Amino acid sequence: MSTSDPQPGPRRSFVGPRILSGAILGLGLVVLYGSFQIRQGGGYSAVGPRFFPLAVAVGLLALGLIFLLRTTLIPDLDLAEHAAIEESATHWQSVGLLLAALVTYAFALQLLGYVVATALFISVVARFLGSRSVVRDLVVGVGIALVVYIGFTRFLGVRLPAGLLDFIL
Amino acid sequence: MDVWNSLLNGFATALSPEYLLLAAIGVTLGTLVGVLPGIGPALTVALLLPITYNFDPTGAFIMFAGIYYGGMYGGSTTSILLNTPGESASVATTIEGFAMAKAGRGGAALATSAIGSFVAGTISTIAITFVAPAVAQLALLFQPADYFALTVLAFVSVTALVGRSLLRGMLSLFVGLFVGLVGIDVLSGQTRFTFGVRELLDGLDIVVVAVGLFAVGEALYVASRMRYAAEEIVGVKGSVWMTRDEWRRSWKPWLRGTLIGFPLGSLPAGGAEIPTFLSYSLEKRLSKHKEEFGRGAIEGVAGPEAANNAAFSGVLVPLLTLGIPTSATAAILLVAFQIYNLQPGPLLFQNAPDLVWALIASLYIGNVMLLVLNLPLVRIWIKLLEIPRPLLYSSILVFATLGVYSLANSVIDVLIMYGIGLVGFFMRRYDFPVGPTVLGVILVPLMEAQFRRALSISQGDLTIFLRRPISLTILLLAVAAVLLPYVPALIARLRGKKRTEGRFVFGSGSED
Amino acid sequence: MYRMIRFIALPLLVLLLLAACGAAGEPTGAGGQDSPATAASTSANAPSAAAESSITASAVASASAGGAAASTGGTTTSGAATTAGGSATFGTQPINIMAPAAPGGGWDQTARAVQPGLAAATNQNVQVYNVPGAGGTVGLAQFVNDHRGNPNQLMMTGLVMVGAIQTNNAPVDLTQATPLATLTTEWEAIVVPTNSKYQNLKELMDDFKANPSAISWGGGSAGSTDHVLVGLLAKEVGADPSKINYIAHSGGGEALSAILSGAVSAGVSGLNEVRDQVQAGQLRLLGVSSDERLEGLDAPTVTEAGYNVTLPNWRGIVAPPDISAEERAAMIAALERMHETPEWQQALEKNGWNDFFRTGDEFTSFLQEETTRLQTVLRDIGLVQ
């Protein structure tokens, strides 16, 4: 990892870990709130459905607080260095594009059908990930999409949306 | 000997050329579908099961056995090489297996996994043949309190999974615990943390969590670094095969994994995940190469894989003798039985002895067939790593989506998996281990249900966990497992103090 | 380039093998005595040659029963599909049956048992698919929302779903679907391990009445048929239903192992799930929830033991909302023919299901009664507010 790092050195960053500890505390609060939303069930039970959720909420909040301390008052230098290396090596645009592609793919499955959506997804994502051979990606994409579609629907009984190609497949 | 003859008869049935061909086809198909990233053995078996209906019962079971072993091995292959386990029982293997692959020892990891499965399969086939009825009777002694103790013991194995920071490991675990609580509470029928989403009512399928955390998380992570880091192609360092040293380090974990897997798998509330995690933590604890754990220790692959395989044979014990399916695969196998108008249970050995023994024999044949077909193929699987990264990762995402989508034809599940993938991405970024999360998701439903059941049965009396001998023994084991690593240090410290009193020079030296 | 070819070659190989398997499998399947191929494959094609005449006849019946405009359809004998084509979209397209549970459960098995008979009765391809989740309510919501007005979509339903709709407070309920027919019932059994101190139902119920929470009942999920039976019994003996100590389990197997291990005082389960254990002497059958004593089973009914409780665990089949009266009648007619097929009768016998065939409005009013009955019990138990 460090060999490919463009900026080696003992740089430290606490921005990410602090945001993360905030997120964990947020999750803890959500779990705490959610635990009180659970209706105590009917009938006899020694321990109700709220007990474990509350324990998990308390655990998350306590550990989240400790984690917050480790990024502020009692800093964890090891983590900070790791975070700095990661942050300088992250290409956020790729992550964003890939996520957008994934979500689009999930919806396109229904709209365009499995084959079209998958073929497009493979070639587009391969390009996001740095591939420059458009034709190769498209051929592979169409190939995988067709083989999976036919194999899974005809032979394995999985229902995949046919979409645009409804009239042929 | 009666049992022996029955088994031999089973083999005689299963060894005809026609059935051997079916076994070979089953193994091949199972491997090829199972090797798709994100598609685990249970799904492979469910997908391919209808094909077996074309044959007579014996043929169907033989093919089933082939498909199962093929699917399991195919799943391990992608877990090890691409860090994309398709089910929770492969997660423990993935941790060291992927590290080995990154270090150029992917071939050895695949080999130790295949041979480990074979060893475990052989031993547990013998065990099923001779001790199944006795084991089934013993298993019936387990009550909710005892199962709760067992989950406590399994939780101890989290200490082996936490990685570099206990705090971050515990946070990962608690996130998993939360995820495991989502859905309708089995005991009271109340909904928890579903936030009005219908698809969450039955909780998050462990497949969605495992595939999201591993496959999608890994793909996002790779994507984030692709522009900066040069493609790190993992070549094979040294021999493709296991070295003499790797053999020496593998055989004990194989045996220990089998010893953990078979009995735990045969408990009516066992399953295959707990034994794999227990085996992993045991191997880490016993290993002479502790420093290698996390960076590719072969023991961490050999043990869990053997445990996984032995647990599957163990799962057959309650299925065949009590009619109780305890894993996803066993549930599918139960369906297969019912299609042939057979109800597994206490009468199965009386009603259809030929079929049962043929099944046991064919499971073994499937196991052997796997070894025969797949060991030579290790070289080819390794080539998976040579696929250009952009294509490889876009295909992994496609197959992960396919696997999750085919669980329930639900786009919501797919979106949830992507969301979990994003969480997995951030966990990788900030060095949070993902193993504890998966362990939490698996264990919390079991632990909570058994804890509350035990207390309802005892009407709130907490001492039930200490009054039952089985429960007490397991709890003591768990306590020992937590404390044992500190014992040498403790003794050393005690001795050290005594020495400080005696010899000042040495004492002051060791204080620093 | 070479790499690329290899990349595609793998999945292709899968396909080839699958195809080879399918082809190789067929003769073996046909040769088999009970031909599991047709009974079980996910897509049962209507048999063409052997049963030709009967299919044609039945398809004609379907067209006329459907009140289709093409009255001449009755005389057409060329092909069943074209005949049925007279009535709108019904009978011209493959039929899909949703089993709103995981493979292997009661709904899944019933759907797969309906499959071959319905394929023969409609001369259509019939497919079964699973949408598991939350006692069938996940499947129900999907079914009602996605297939409005489509007569070729069917879904399995039953008592469990009626209960789950109420306990889960489901946004969609069964009144939104179009009831077609009930198909089967299964009876519930009350069992104890053979070494239990309870020799008969009365002893158990006496202790239950004296201290309800001291008797722990092992059974399926909260609000399931098993749970409902305990609730009904509690009301019958005058025990406080909110004090029932019911230990819910997520699957039949899990509950069975709890009962066998003696962890719970008594167990409630589908009769078929414990039949073998009773026969093998591991469990003692204290009572069956049927209205009269079952043939070949040496156990009293709950009513015989002095408690006026019967509880059939019934299963049926529904269509989506907003299908026309003609389409509904046509599908009911098809189900009636399915009911007569030997495949269906065999399936009943093989699975130990009781024939419980009520169609159309009879089903609708039955459904209403069951909904009210369950609502009361579930409220008493405290699962529904």
Image (cartoon, rainbow, N blue to C red):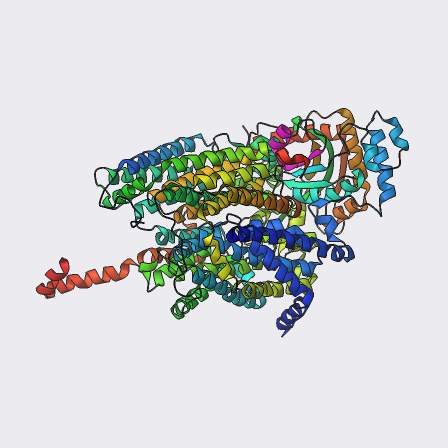
Residue B100 in picture, x, y percent from top left? 39, 58
Residue C136 in picture, x, y percent from top left? 61, 36
On screen, residue C102 versus residue B160, left or right, reads: right
Q: Looking at the image, how many numbered discs can be counted on the residues?
A: 0
Q: Which residues are magenta?
A: C142-163
Residue B280 in picture, x, y percent from top left? 40, 57
**Residue B240 belongs to magenta span:** no
The C terminus of chain B - image quarter: bottom left
Task: Give the vertical position of C335 relative to C269 (above or below).
Answer: above
Of all residues, the one furthest to the right in this rendering is C75
**Residue B367 versus residue B172: which sits nearer the camera?**
B367
Task: Give the vertical position of B51 relative to B180 (above or below).
Answer: below
On screen, residue B4 versus residue B502, left or right, reads: right
> Can I make out residue B468 in this image?
no
Which of the 4 quarters of the picture holds residue B242?
bottom left
Of all residues, the one furthest to the left in this rendering is B504
Residue that appears at 67% across and 62% down: B355
Which of the 4 quarters of the picture holds residue B14?
bottom right
**Residue C148 belongs to magenta span:** yes
Residue that appears at 28% across and 58% down: B486
The N terminus of chain B - image quarter: bottom right
> Can I make out residue A84 in this image?
yes
**Residue B105 versus residue C206: which sits nearer the camera?**
B105
On screen, residue A28 versus residue B11, left or right, reads: left
Task: Give the vertical position of B58 relative to A51 (above or below).
Answer: below
**Residue A45 versus residue C173: which sits nearer the camera?**
C173
